[in-house]
Image (tube, rainbow, N blue to C red):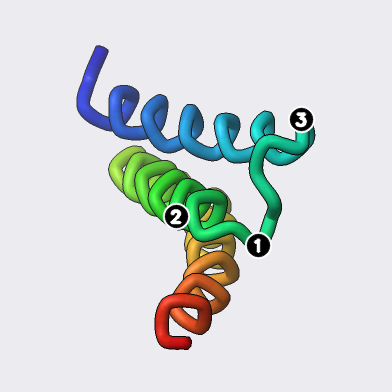
Amino acid sequence: MDASSIIGSAGVSLLLLAFVLNITNKLNSEATAYLVLNVLGALLAGISSYLISFWPFVILEGVWMFASLVPLIKKLVK
């Protein structure tokens, strides 16, 4: 397995973990842990997409990361 696959697999795993924890009511979508999982997962998936030059997913994951990062920063600054 090459580096982009390892990085992408880690990122997608974090995103799926956040999703599963949310739909099973173990983690609220406003929880710090949920937001961190989404930021890190999207960042890693975005890096992986960049490494293989798959631009649609670079954009998707970049937007996902920033969409999760904004509320995380707001939460941490309070």
Residue 75 seen by the camera: yes
**Residue 68 vertical position relative to residue 70 in the rendered view, above or below:** above
Q: Residue 24 carries which label?
A: 3
Which residue is at 41% across, 86% downward?
77
Instruction: Count how many numbered circles sit on residues in the image.
Output: 3
Which residue position is annotated with label 2? 36
Mark 3 or mark 2, earlier in chain? 3
In front here: 26 or 14? Answer: 26
Q: How crowded is mark 1: few (under 14 residues within 10 Å), some or many (20 or more)?
A: few
Which residue is at 57% across, 75% downward?
71
Quadrant into which the N terminus falls: top left
Between circles 3 and 2, the one closer to the viewer is 3
Q: How crowded is mark 2: few (under 14 residues within 10 Å), some or many (20 or more)?
A: some
In the displayed orientation, state which residue is furthest to the top: 1
Q: Is residue 37 left or right of residue 19?
A: left
Q: How far apart are marks 3 and 2 (CA)?
A: 18 Å
Instruction: Please tell me in which quadrant of the rendered image residue 29 appears.
Output: bottom right
Which residue is at 22% across, 20% downward?
2
**Secondary structure beneath disc 2?**
helix
Mark 1 or mark 2, earlier in chain? 1
Mark 3 or mark 1, earlier in chain? 3
Amino acid, disc 1: Glu
Q: Residue 44, image x and y in percent?
A: 36, 45
Amino acid, disc 2: Val
**Secondary structure beneath disc 1?**
loop
Amino acid, disc 3: Thr
Q: In this view, does 78 lie to the left or right of 18?
A: left
Q: Which mark is residue 46?
A: none
Q: Which mark is residue 30?
A: 1
